Image (spheres, grey):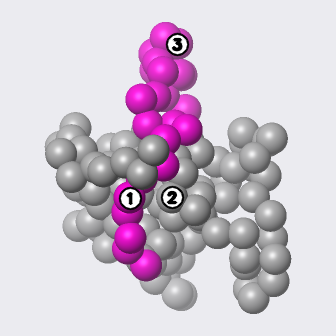
């Protein structure tokens, strides 16, 4: 795994064709939403041990990716197990949360090398 590679999770306020607002005020609910059920290959997932959650391009959370995950064999989707970085390092402060990325991919979950990060703000 490379410490320069992030899994980027693009969150939406729609689910199953209906409006489903993101729970910004509830850390655990937001984390659960980011853990999601993603169509993701193990090869892609194995490239990083960190994740950024984006909403309309703005980084709303940063997580560590656990070695544990759940695979739904019926639909081939993976549910991640995300960890608050402050649990490993209480002094952790993300340099990405609150920033808006110039990241024009339509894929809901991808990988991004930190050297390729561009900001809109």
Q: Is residue 80 above or below residue 104?
A: above
User: Callout 1: few (<14), some (14-19), or many (20+) C-alpha neighbours within 10 Å?
Assistant: some
Element type at marker 3? loop
Q: Is residue 6 visible?
A: yes
Judging depth in this view, the residue of 70 and 41 nearest the camera is 41
Q: Is residue 113 above or below residue 11?
A: above
Q: CA distance from mark 3 to mark 1?
A: 29 Å
Mark sitting earlier along the chain (3/1): 3
* Main SS, magenta residues: loop
Residue 97: within the magenta? yes
User: Which x, y percent locates residue 39?
Assistant: 45, 78
Mark sitting earlier along the chain (1/2): 2
Residue marked by disc 3: 90
Judging depth in this view, the residue of 23 and 66 nearest the camera is 23
User: Which x, y percent locates residue 32?
Assistant: 67, 53
Q: Residue at x 52, y 13 (%)?
A: 90
Asked whether the beta carbons under mark 1 and mark 2 sit within 8 Å of each other, the answer is yes
Q: Across the whole image, how many numbered discs are drawn on residues?
A: 3
Element type at marker 1? loop
User: Which x, y percent locates residue 1?
Assistant: 19, 46
Residue marked by disc 1: 102
Judged left or right of residue 24, residue 80 is left
Mark sitting earlier along the chain (3/2): 2
Q: In the rendering, which numbered label is found on residue 3?
A: none
**Bounds of the magenta segment:** 83-106
Residue marked by disc 2: 57
């Amino acid at each position: 795994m490379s410490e320069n590679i992030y899994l980027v999770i693009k969150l939406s306020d729609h689910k199953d064709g209906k409006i489903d607002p993101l729970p910004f005020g509830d850390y655990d609910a937001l984390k659960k939403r980011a853990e999601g059920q993603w169509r993701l290959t193990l090869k892609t997932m194995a490239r990083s041990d960190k994740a950024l959650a984006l909403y309309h391009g703005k980084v709303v959370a940063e997580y560590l990716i656990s070695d544990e995950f759940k695979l739904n064999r019926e639909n081939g989707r993976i549910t991640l197990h995300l960890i608050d970085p402050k649990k490993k390092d209480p002094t952790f402060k993300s340099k990405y949360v609150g920033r808006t990325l110039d990241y024009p991919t339509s894929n809901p979950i991808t990988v991004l090398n930190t050297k390729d990060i561009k900001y809109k703000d």
